[in-house]
Image (cartoon, grey):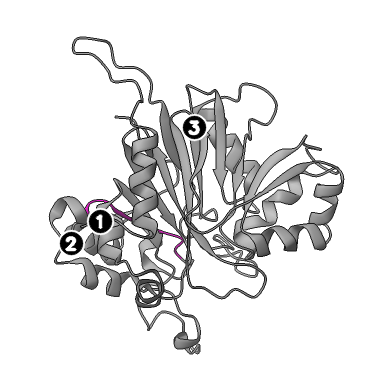
Amino acid sequence: MTPKGPLLSLAIGAALVANAPVEEAGEEPEACAIEVIVLGAGQDAGAPQIGNAGDDGPHLLPSSLGVIDREGSARYLFDATPAITQQLAMLDGVEPPAAGLGVDGVFLTHAHIGHYLGLAFLGFEAANADSVPVYAMPRMAQFLRSNAPWSQLVAYDNIAITEMADQMLIPVSDSFAVSPILMPHRDELSETVGFAILGGLNAALYVPDLDSWDEWEESSGATLEQLIANVDVAFIDATFWDDNELDGRDMSAIPHPRVAATMDRLQHLSASERDKVHFIHYNHTNPIRDPDSAESREVRARGFNIARRGDGYCLTD
């Protein structure tokens, strides 16, 4: 089948980076050239959430990925969360920056609090960064340019915005490229995208937020199964476990794919395809927050995975 839509972006991206160095037989293995690090796996507010200081469950940082390009001595963030200070310190422990903050680019999914508030710490009152590249969709870019305090980041040249387009292929280096994929979501302030992250001959998918896979399939002309087939690891929305999670709330008004329903939807896939799926962006109420919960055990027993802070994945193996 000829790829189309986001699948075409993935196919082009694989061709773009196909010239990545190949290790010869008998050579010592080199450090991973393009590595994806999970810097946080929680919903926007993390855990414990405000007003719940007594919550003694596992600590969650908002969802974010770091990408290390060792050949280019560069590091990139996918989403700038309110926990950016802690998350950059974590990244420093994996691969120290070549200089300064070591933020060579920030790719934003959308304008909900867990995904862009960390940009404020690049500003005059904190890092006073120098023209950090920020990749954003047109409405997201306009929001940043037009609303304080984000507009001050632009005026003071703390950030330099590059506008993206749906399925646009962004060659970040000779062996690393990124492509945004529009996702249906509550778009009060900006569009919402996921990202295909392309390194070497491999690819990762990052979709922390969307309303419905059915809605995305209708608008894109592709299927979730096809999207997973075209990547090697897929970080996808796991905000809620099922429709019974929030007492006293009409959960139909909070449309996210439920983890239980996503597993049912993908259970027909082969074991190797199911193993690609890593659930991310789980709410503090979601029982998969606890690695020892019955629900976490169920995810693993059914052949899927749960993203945990500190997990790393090499895209150039």
Q: Position of residue 296 (x, y in %)?
A: 29, 61
Which of disc 1 and disc 3 is earlier in sequence? 1
Q: Position of residue 199 (x, y in %)?
A: 39, 36
Task: Give, as a three-letter code, the residue at label 3.
Answer: Ile
Quarter of image, res 256: bottom left
Q: Residue at x 16, y 61 (%)?
A: 269
Q: Which residue is mark 1?
A: 2
In this picture, is 282 found above or below 11?
A: below
The answer for how far apart the CA atoms under marks 1 and 2 are is: 31 Å
Which of disc 2 and disc 1 is earlier in sequence? 1
Q: Position of residue 131 (x, y in %)?
A: 75, 37
Residue 133 or 237: which is nearer the viewer?
133
Q: Which residue is mark 2?
A: 302
The answer for how far apart the CA atoms under marks 3 and 1 are is: 31 Å
Q: Nearer the viewer, mark 3 or mark 2?
A: 3
In this picture, is 223 found above or below 37?
A: below
Task: Give, as a three-letter code, the residue at label 2.
Answer: Arg
Q: Which residues are magenta?
A: 275-282
- Determine whether the residue tagged by mark 2 lies in a helix, strand or loop: loop
Q: Pointers 1 and 2 in contact (CB under 8 A)? A: no
Question: Mark 3, residues whose alpha carbon is within 10 Å: few (<14), some, or many (≥20)?
Answer: many
Task: Give, as a three-letter code, the residue at label 1.
Answer: Thr
Q: Pointers 3 and 2 in contact (CB under 8 A)? A: no
Q: Nearer the viewer, mark 1 or mark 2?
A: 1
Residue 170 or 214: which is nearer the viewer?
170
Q: Pointers 3 and 1 in contact (CB under 8 A)? A: no
